[in-house]
Amino acid sequence: MLNPVRMTVLASGSKGNSTVIASARTRILVDAGLSCRELLKRMAAVGEDPAALTAILITHEHQDHVAGLAVLARRLNIPVFFTEPTHRAWVRMLTPRTTMTYAKWLDHVQAEKEARAQAAAMAVAAEVSAVLTQDASVEISGEADPDFALHVDPDAAEESCEPEETRAAVKANPTFLPAVEYFQAGQTFCIGDIDINPFTIPHDAADPCGFVFHARSETIRMAVATDLGYVPPNVKQALKGVDVLLLESNHDLEMLKDGPYPWSVKQRVLSRVGHLSNHAAAEFLLRDYDGGAHTIVLGHLSESNNLPELAKLAAEQAIGNRMTLLGNRIVLAAQHEPLEPICL
Ligand SMILES: [Zn+2]
Ligand SMILES: [Zn+2]
């Protein structure tokens, strides 16, 4: 039996990101950056029941965070929480030929609401098990994370596993979701018994956010902070007092500089709205981190420009330099397999 309060990293890295945050009553999937099929497979592998998910929460619209989003949300028939700019960017990404004015966007939102009401009337029920045995493909285009653009998963979506009624709605509108909820960075909201503090992160997306999750019944805090070019004061502030921290440690500076990426992509990764280096993560741990976390998970490691040993060594040295923090456990999140649930 799993401890009710836990963080389970299903995947982390430039080919896809997804993490389950669970309390006794609520289970939230943070990002859906693998195919629906792969996400369900990984949840099964670590004992997370997809049917028990309450909602999906999106950090930003880059492909490595949303590749399986639409199919999974429709399959499980659960709401998706975005900021409004992120939702807009995602919709534009899936309808790239449309130049959407704000008036058109409002029309679109209205049309989507009507489509949802219609679909609800048709009682679209999802059978999770069915998707495990079926597959198909659909093209997804649009903006990608700089680190993700180089390797797009061909299994990025699978529409044909959806019920007939949903397929009809999707044909009319590929951005159809069972329900959309908006939140704003800096404004706490809740899903079930988890309070969520979304904070702005510096990254080249429409309105990217990190999150602190507070499982109310257990007074436990878990944070997700990946895809940030540096650690600004609001992020340092938000990450105080967390019990489990998923922190980006994307690249080794030397490996990135000497690595295979084109110069323009290197510049983007290195920029203030790119990704956090091992060095920058270590600097945060050394200077700004309060030392309270039971576990620090290093995530979003680049496969081309980092080595797990380098990321871990940098973080361990930073923590090790502060004697009071020797109790901290550092683990590495992986791209190709889920991590064991981190229970508290
Ligand atoms: Zn990413
Ligand atoms: Zn990104």
Image (spheres, rainbow, N blue to C red):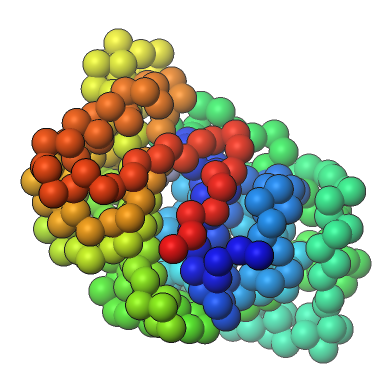
Q: Position of residue 114 (x, y in %)?
A: 69, 85
Residue 33 visible in rendering: no
At x 83%, y 55%, the residue is 131
Q: Is residue 60 above or below residue 199?
A: above
At x 41%, y 78%, the residue is 218
User: Where's the C terminus, which quadrant?
Assistant: bottom left
Ligand 1 quadrant assignment: top left
Q: Is residue 306 above or below residue 279?
A: above
User: Where's the N terminus, which quadrant?
Assistant: bottom right
Asked if residue 15 lies left or right of residue 39, the reply is left
Viewer-nearest residue: 167 or 305: 305
At x 86%, y 59%, the residue is 129
Q: Position of residue 299 (x, y in %)?
A: 40, 41
- Tell me the quarter of the picture where residue 259 sits: top left
Q: Position of residue 77 (x, y in %)?
A: 72, 73
- Tell me the quarter of the picture where residue 187 sits: bottom left
Residue 48 visible in rendering: yes
At x 55%, y 44%, the residue is 339
Asked if residue 330 lies left or right of residue 172, the reply is left
